[in-house]
Image: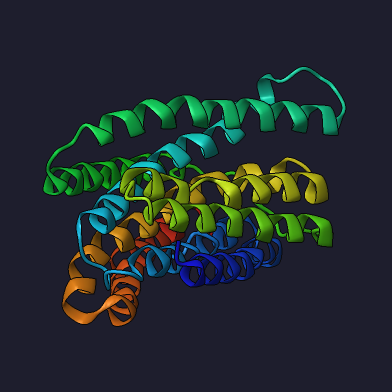
Amino acid sequence: MDWLPLIGSAVLSGLVAVLVTLAIERFGGVVGGLLGTLPTTIVPAALGIGWANNGQGPVFVAAMAAVPVGMLIDAGFLWMWRALPPRLPAWSLRARLAMMIAVSLAGWTALAIPTMGALHRLADPLTGLWIGALALGINALAGALASRQRRPAPKGSRPVGPIVLVARGLLAGLAVGLATGVAQTGDGVLAGVLSVFPAIFLTTMVGLWLAQGEAVPAGAVGPMMLGSTSVGGFALTVTFTAPVLGIGAGATVAWVVAVLACTLPAYAWLRATQLTPR
């Protein structure tokens, strides 16, 4: 196993991941939620997975095609953090949080396992790309619908603790490191889904719930669902740019395309639905 891309992508992802909680805390759930879903940890994941073959080959394509599907599952994970808290028992804050963590992760797993099984049965990488594009479209629609009404999303009043920030970086780095290692075994689908395991979303929800209460993370759900389309957009784009430009330049171009095609329209939608004074 080539340890350099594995360790490099894991460390870079961990460092980048810490900034997302700080963005939501600083700018509030709407703008911060959108900033936090820019293509960040997926970039070192793509670099790590594409390291050996310069962003070419069936494993790389299968991994990147699986990313938008994984992000659609992540959107369902996020939605649970808005829909379920009002239905939880009137327990203490930490008891309710523990239940939310258990239920949301169980829900993500229940969706991810059969989805990966279905993707593994695809013989044609091109079919995987079409399925990824469909998942990206569904994710965009779900995010737009989840953000069509204004919800409380205030700026944080207390900083997220260093323990949560460290846990965030470690979990994100572990997920991307595992994805890079799995890709070296030839399982592109599993690598792609692992690369977008909701470590960032989970630690965001937990950290903000503990530090700010339930309003900030619940208000960030819709913008994060909508903004996360940029991750899937990056993954699909890099399958075309990397073989032509190389993995480094290809990832750079794909990042710019994802921001222009996904993040900016998402911001325009949020301005119209949530940021415009009423």
In the image, residue 192 above or below residue 118:
below
Quadrant that contains the N terminus? bottom left
**Which residue does the image show at 76% across and 30% down from the upper left?**
98
Judge from the rendering whether residue 167 lies leftward or rightward of residue 45; answer left or right. right
- Name which quarter of the figure residue 88 lies in: top right
Can residue 77 be seen here? yes
Depth order, front residue of 276/49: 49
Quadrant that contains the C terminus? bottom right
* x and y percentages locating residue 273 in the rendered image: 45, 51
* x and y percentages locating residue 223 in the rendered image: 49, 51
Tally of numbered discs: 0
Judge from the rendering whether residue 133 lies leftward or rightward of residue 6; answer left or right. left
* x and y percentages locating residue 52 in the rendered image: 33, 69
- Name which quarter of the figure residue 118 lies in: top left
Q: Residue furthest right?
A: 92
Can residue 161 be seen here? no
**Which residue does the image show at 32% across and 29% down from the upper left?**
117
**Which residue does the image show at 55% across and 44% down from the upper left?**
221
Depth order, front residue of 152/91: 91
